[in-house]
C-alpha cells in the first residue's frame, strides 16, 4: 500500500489545500465568520495530515525531528480528531445563529481537546516503551495494550464525530432553503459515511490481531475510504460556494443553445424582412441575454409582418398531417405555426399575398402568437417552432404539398 499512499495522499493534500485557498477568498469581506474560519481550519488540517501521511514525508519528518512516530501522532490528532471537531463547528454555525451555535460548539471542542490530550499521553507512553520507528504505527503496534487503547480512543472519537456529522448534515439538509447548501450537506454526509469505513477497519484491527490476523492485509480499505470519502466531503463543504456558479453556467449554456436553435427561422425572416432586425449579427458570447431578447422580439415582429401572407388552409392541412403523425399539444401547435411561417415567407417571396380569411375550422388560428410567460419560456417556445421550421417532415410535406396542388 506504500506505493498507492505515495500517490493518493499528496493528491488529497492538494485537494484540501486547493479548497482552503479557494475559500480564503471569502475572508476579503472583513467579516469574522466563525463557520468559515472553522471550515478553513478543517481543510488546512486535513491537507497537512495527508501531506504528513505520505510515506516519504513522514519518514523525513521523523528523522529530522529525531522522534519516532511523531508524524503518526500529528496525523491522528490534527487530521483526525481536530479535523472532525472543526467540521462539527462548521455545521453548527451553518445551521444556527452564533448565539446558539457557540454553546453547542464549545462542548464539542472541549471533548475533542480531552481526546487529544488522552491520545498524547498514551502516545508518550508507547514511545517510552519502544524507540523504534514503525512504518504503520497503529497496525504494527496494536497488539500492545497502550497502543490498542490509543487506537480505540482515536477510532471511537472519529466514528462518533462522523456519525454526528452525518446526522447533522441530513437533518439540516431537510430544512435548508438554498439548493446548493442542501446538496452540499447531503454530499458531505455521503462522504462521511464512506470515510468512516477507514475507522471501522482500524477498530477491527484491535480485535483481529488477537486472533492472529494481520490488519495490513486489508489496508486497501483504508486507502479507498480516504480516496473516495474525502473528495466527497471536501466537495460537499465547498459546494455552497461554487455550486451557484454552475447554475449560472448552466443557464448561460441553455440560453446559448436556445439562441442558436432560433437561427434557421430568424435567418429566413431576416432575408425577407430585414426591417425587423435592430442590430447586425455579431458575437453572442459577451451579451447573450440581450441578443436572445432581441432575436425573440425580431421573430415575433416577423410573425406579425407575415400575417397577411398566411392562410387558414395551410393551418388546416398541417394540423391534419400532424395529427396523422401522432402529434398533439404544443408539438402540433409548433408544426402548424412553422408551416404557416414557411408558406408565408414563400408567398411573400413570390409576391402573391394570401388574405388571412375564412370560416372557423376548429384548428389553430393562423399565427396566434402562442408562447410563454417570460423571455426564457417565450424563446424556448420559438425554438420549438424554429426546429419544426427547419427539420419537421410534417412542415415540409404541408408546404411542398400545398405548393404542388396550387
Image (cartoon, rainbow, N blue to C red):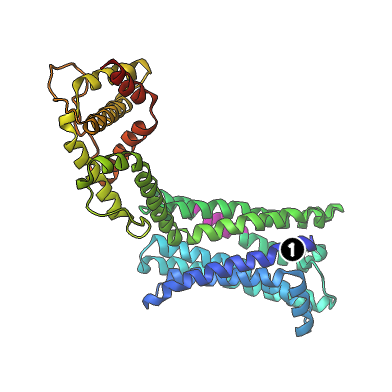
- When asked about the image quadrant of residue 376, the answer is top left
Name the element at disc 1. helix
| Residue in front for this viewpoint, 220 or 127 | 220
- When asked about the image quadrant of residue 196, the answer is bottom right
| Residue in front for this viewpoint, 225 or 350 | 350
Q: Is residue 61 left or right of residue 334?
A: right
Q: Which residue is rendered at x = 56% and y = 68% of the image?
A: 18
Q: Residue furthest right?
A: 212
Placement of the N terminus among the 4 image quadrants = bottom right
Q: Is residue 1 left or right of residue 52?
A: right
Where's residue 159, x and y in %? 62, 57
Where's residue 85, x and y in %? 54, 66
* Label 1 packing within 10 angstroms: few (<14), some (14-19), many (20+): some
Q: Residue furthest front?
A: 350
Q: Is residue 228 left or right of residue 166?
A: right
Residue 93 shows in the view: yes
- When asked about the image quadrant of residue 132, the answer is bottom right
* Vertical side of 372 occupied by 287: above or below: below
| Residue in front for this viewpoint, 252 or 256 | 256
Where's residue 117, x and y in %? 63, 75
State which region is magenta. Answer: 159-167
Where's residue 67, x and y in %? 77, 81
| Prevailing SS of the magenta stretch | helix
Q: Is residue 165 magenta?
A: yes
Q: Return the residue at label 1.
A: 5
Amino acid at each position: 500500500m506504500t506505493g498507492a499512499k505515495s500517490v493518493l495522499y499528496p493528491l488529497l493534500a492538494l485537494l484540501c489545500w486547493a479548497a482552503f485557498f479557494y475559500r480564503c477568498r471569502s475572508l476579503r469581506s472583513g467579516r469574522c465568520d466563525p463557520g468559515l474560519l472553522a471550515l478553513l481550519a478543517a481543510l488546512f488540517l486535513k491537507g497537512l495530515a495527508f501531506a504528513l501521511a505520505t510515506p516519504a514525508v513522514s519518514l523525513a519528518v521523523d528523522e529530522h525531528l529525531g522522534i519516532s512516530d511523531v508524524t503518526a501522532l500529528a496525523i491522528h490528532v490534527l487530521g483526525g480528531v481536530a479535523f472532525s471537531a472543526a467540521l462539527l463547528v462548521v455545521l453548527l454555525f451553518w445551521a444556527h445563529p452564533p448565539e446558539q451555535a457557540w454553546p453547542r460548539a464549545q462542548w464539542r471542542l472541549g471533548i475533542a481537546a480531552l481526546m487529544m490530550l488522552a491520545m498524547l499521553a498514551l502516545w508518550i507512553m508507547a514511545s517510552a516503551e519502544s524507540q523504534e520507528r514503525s512504518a504503520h504505527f497503529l497496525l504494527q503496534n496494536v497488539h500492545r495494550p497502550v497502543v490498542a487503547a490509543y487506537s480505540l480512543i482515536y477510532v471511537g472519537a472519529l466514528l462518533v464525530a462522523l456519525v454526528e456529522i452525518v446526522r447533522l448534515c441530513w437533518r439540516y439538509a431537510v430544512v435548508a432553503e438554498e439548493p446548493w447548501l442542501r446538496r452540499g450537506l447531503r454530499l458531505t454526509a455521503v462522504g462521511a459515511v464512506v470515510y468512516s469505513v477507514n475507522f471501522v477497519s482500524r477498530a477491527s484491527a484491535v480485535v483481529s490481531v488477537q486472533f492472529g490476523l494481520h490488519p495490513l492485509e486489508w489496508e486497501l480499505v483504508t486507502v479507498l475510504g480516504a480516496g473516495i470519502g474525502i473528495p466527497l466531503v471536501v466537495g460537499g463543504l465547498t459546494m455552497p460556494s461554487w455550486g451557484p456558479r454552475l447554475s449560472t453556467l448552466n443557464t448561460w449554456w441553455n440560453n446559448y443553445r436556445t439562441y442558436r436553435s432560433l437561427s434557421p427561422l430568424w435567418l429566413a425572416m431576416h432575408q425577407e424582412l430585414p426591417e425587423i432586425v435592430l442590430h447586425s449579427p455579431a458575437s453572442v458570447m459577451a451579451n447573450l441575454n440581450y441578443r436572445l431578447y432581441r432575436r425573440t422580439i425580431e421573430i415575433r415582429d416577423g410573425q406579425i409582418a407575415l400575417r397577411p401572407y398566411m392562410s387558414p388552409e395551410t393551418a388546416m392541412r398541417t394540423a391534419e398531417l400532424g395529427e396523422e403523425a401522432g402529434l398533439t399539444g404544443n408539438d402540433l401547435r409548433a408544426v402548424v405555426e412553422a408551416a404557416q411561417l414557411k408558406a408565408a415567407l414563400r408567398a411573400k417571396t413570390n409576391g402573391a399575398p394570401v388574405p388571412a380569411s375564412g370560416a372557423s375550422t376548429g384548428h389553430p388560428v393562423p399565427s396566434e402568437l402562442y408562447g410563454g410567460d417570460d423571455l426564457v419560456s417565450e424563446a424556448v417556445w420559438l425554438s420549438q417552432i424554429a426546429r419544426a421550421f427547419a427539420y419537421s417532415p410534417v412542415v415540409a410535406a404541408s408546404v411542398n404539398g400545398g405548393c404542388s396542388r396550387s
